């Protein structure tokens, strides 16, 4: 009953620890995860605003360029209006009585005046529309002369006395790559062509519409290049910042995760130690209360054995069973007490090979009874080491008995000692050819109250590990099912 209850307690603690440990680990890392996500999100937002800023800057530069070009066109158009009216309209009316651009002489005169006025200016074309009909009367591009309805709404606005401009552009930052079409930008400015009064004022009757076309492709390309540089530099800076932040966050993430895991591991060990302490107190109390009545029962059974031999010879085996079982229960109680109240190690130099030989001599009869072959390889290089001989003797016996129990039908038991060259520590290897154990069982065998046998407290190997820990050593096991097990003790 005690065995089943202890096994249930152990399995319950394992089932609860793992999910709880993971959940607490996530909770411990959550604040840093939020900081990490906030950092990356901030970088993304900054990058988006950088693109928006580059677009705003390029847009503003484009508007400034257009405003300056439009002002330049208006100034040029006013000057052109003055020269055309004074140099062409007035002389032509006086000489010919009317203006007829179909006359080659009149057309050439107007063309000469326009080209002289726009010479060395950044003008792509100058076009003059008639005031009565939407038709091109003159253009520096001869192919356009005579075409109708080319002015559009801009012509109508200028004809009503409102100067206005129209921009025609194509291309973006992708057109800067080799093999793509070049960017193109034109500014068309429409102004009314007025009669010039004697005081040089330009508010006379509207005689037509002047269209001045400027090629702003180079300026527009410069703005697109500026936009590309802003985006490129911003992206480069953001990439560098992102990589730096990524390195910092990744390193911090590892450090934080490592520290959280260490903290949770320490908390888990502390919790486990506290549970063991409470369990040890309970076991010590119960064992102490059982020990005295158990001694009385055993003493009484021994007296009964003697009396039954006299009164009813042949029936004393019943009392002997009581003595045997009370002896076994007493051993279990003593094992509980040793676990609950471990003895403090009294260390002094001891020849370790001698302690091993004594333990092997003690179990030799049992080895012969179970047909187990013993192989011993004790190194002469192993001298004296500082141990508690009594506690260490018990630890050896626990491992040896565990190996014997793993070979119910016989086998081989091998004990080896030696010195580890790397650090000079002593190792003791106890190898059996028994049933072996699974990976899951290997992680559980040193835990208190774990056992897979019908009888036993599950404390033997747990006590052994406590003894080895007191000697500042380590104990490990390597095993495969049906291939035996090897317990290795390392002592400094």
Image (tube, rainbow, N blue to C red):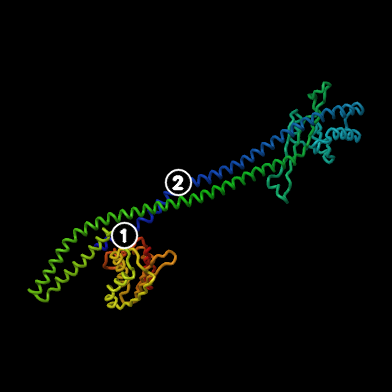
Label 1: state its secondary structure: helix
Q: Nearer the viewer, residue 431 or 71?
A: 431
Q: Nearer the viewer, residue 432 or 160?
A: 432
Q: Quadrant of residue 490?
A: bottom left
Q: Nearer the viewer, residue 224 or 275?
A: 275
Q: Residues within 10 Å of mark 1 (few under 14, many from 20)?
A: some
In the rendered image, residue 279, in percent from the top left (x then y), is placed at 27, 56
Q: Is residue 216 left or right of residue 327?
A: right
Which sits earlier in the primary sequence, circle 2 or circle 1? 1
Find the distance from the CA under tag 2 to the CA under tag 1.
33 Å
Question: In the rendered image of this protein, does residue 83 appear above or below residue 429?
Answer: above
Question: In the rendered image of this protein, does residue 394 appear above or below residue 112?
Answer: below
Q: Residues within 10 Å of mark 2 (few under 14, many from 20)?
A: few
Q: Is residue 111 left or right of residue 371?
A: right
Question: In the rendered image of this protein, does residue 130 appear above or below residue 428?
Answer: above
> Which dot marks residue 10?
1
* Residue annotated with mark 2: 31
Q: Is residue 368 left or right of residue 322?
A: right
């Amino acid at each position: 009953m005690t065995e089943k209850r202890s096994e249930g307690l152990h399995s319950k603690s394992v089932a609860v620890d793992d999910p709880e440990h993971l959940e607490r680990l996530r909770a411990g890392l959550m604040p840093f995860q939020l900081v990490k996500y906030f950092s990356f999100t901030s970088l993304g937002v900054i990058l988006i605003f950088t693109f928006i800023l580059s677009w705003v800057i390029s847009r503003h530069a484009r508007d400034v360029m257009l405003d300056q070009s439009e002002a330049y066109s208006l100034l040029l158009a006013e000057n052109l209006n003055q020269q055309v009216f004074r140099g062409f309209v007035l002389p032509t009316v006086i000489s010919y009585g009317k203006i007829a651009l179909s006359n080659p002489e009149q057309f050439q005169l107007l063309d000469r005046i326009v080209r002289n006025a726009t010479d060395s200016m950044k003008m792509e074309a100058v076009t003059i529309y008639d005031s009565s009909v939407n038709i091109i009367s003159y253009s520096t591009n001869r192919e356009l002369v005579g075409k109708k309805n080319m002015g559009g709404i801009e012509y109508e606005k200028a004809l009503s006395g409102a100067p206005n401009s129209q921009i025609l552009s194509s291309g973006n930052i992708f057109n800067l790559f080799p093999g793509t079409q070049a960017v193109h930008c034109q500014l068309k400015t429409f102004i009314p062509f007025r009669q010039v009064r004697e005081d040089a004022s330009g508010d006379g009757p509207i005689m037509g519409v002047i269209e001045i076309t400027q090629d702003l492709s180079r300026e527009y390309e410069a703005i697109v290049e500026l936009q590309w540089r802003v985006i490129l530099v911003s992206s480069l800076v953001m990439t560098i910042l992102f990589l730096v932040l990524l390195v910092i966050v990744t390193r911090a993430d590892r450090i934080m995760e490592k520290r959280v895991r260490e903290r949770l591991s320490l908390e888990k060990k502390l919790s486990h130690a506290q549970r063991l302490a409470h369990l040890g107190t309970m076991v010590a109390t119960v064992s102490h209360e059982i020990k005295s009545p158990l001694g009385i029962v055993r003493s009484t059974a021994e007296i009964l054995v003697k009396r039954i031999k006299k009164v009813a010879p042949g029936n004393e085996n019943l009392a002997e069973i009581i003595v045997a079982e009370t002896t076994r229960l007493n051993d279990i109680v003593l094992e509980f007490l040793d676990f609950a109240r471990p003895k403090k190690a009294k260390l002094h130099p001891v020849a370790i090979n001698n302690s091993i030989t004594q333990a092997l001599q003690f179990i030799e009869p049992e080895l012969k009874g179970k047909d187990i072959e013993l192989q011993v390889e004790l190194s002469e290089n192993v001298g004296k080491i500082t141990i508690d001989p009594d506690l260490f003797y018990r630890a050896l016996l626990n491992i040896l008995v565990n190996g014997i129990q793993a070979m119910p039908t016989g086998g081989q038991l091998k004990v080896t000692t030696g010195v580890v060259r790397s650090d000079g520590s002593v190792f003791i290897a106890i190898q059996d050819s028994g049933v072996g154990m699974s990976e899951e069982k290997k992680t559980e065998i040193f835990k208190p109250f774990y056992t897979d046998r019908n009888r036993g407290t599950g404390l033997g190997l747990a006590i052994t590990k406590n003894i080895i820990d007191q000697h500042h050593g380590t104990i490990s096991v390597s095993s495969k099912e049906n291939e035996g097990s090897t317990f290795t003790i390392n002592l400094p």
